[in-house]
Amino acid sequence: MNLKIALFGIAKEIVGQSVLEVNAPEGQPVEQLLEQLRTQYPALSQLSSLAVAVNNEYAEDTQLLQERDEIALIPPVAGG
């Protein structure tokens, strides 16, 4: 399946674009998608945390992905 992933903050800077398209097996869990992305973009492994939202809700690592899901990578945010 073909997944479109929106990237924000430092994740966007690491990948070099705001939307990433990746090919993944049907029904792949979020955890495996993160592993795939960290392999392709090793600097993502340096982040202290990286949340994944699927269809506008934070996703558990075990959530299975579908081709039409709206996926976003949300890096840690610092502020004051």
Image (cartoon, helix red, strand yellow):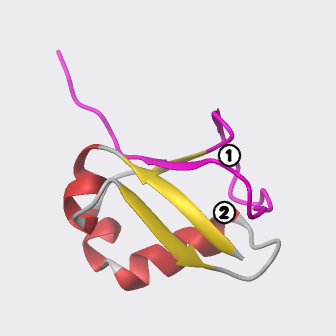
Q: Is residue 58 above or below residue 39?
A: above
Give the residue at x 45% y 51%.
6
- Tag on residue 59? 1
Q: Is residue 73 above or below residue 41?
A: above
Tell me how many marks there are. 2
Quadrant that contains the N terminus? bottom right
Residues at badges 1 and 2 in contact (C-beta under 8 Å)?
Answer: yes
Q: Position of residue 16 (x, y in %)?
A: 22, 64
Give the residue at x 19% y 57%.
13
* Amino acid type assigned to the residue bearing label 2 in the image: Val
- Tag on residue 30? 2
Q: Residue furthest top?
A: 80
- Look at the numbered disc 1 and give the secondary structure of its residue: loop
Over which residues does the magenta segment extend?
54-80
- Disc 1 to disc 2, C-alpha distance: 7 Å
Q: Position of residue 63 (x, y in %)?
A: 78, 56
- Judging depth in this view, the residue of 37 and 46 nearest the camera is 37
Give left or right: position of 17 versus 53. Answer: left
Quadrant that contains the C terminus? top left
Q: Position of residue 3 (x, y in %)?
A: 61, 66
* Amino acid type assigned to the residue bearing label 1 in the image: Ala
Q: Main secondary structure of the magenta part?
A: loop
Q: Residues within 10 Å of mark 1 (few under 14, many from 20)?
A: some
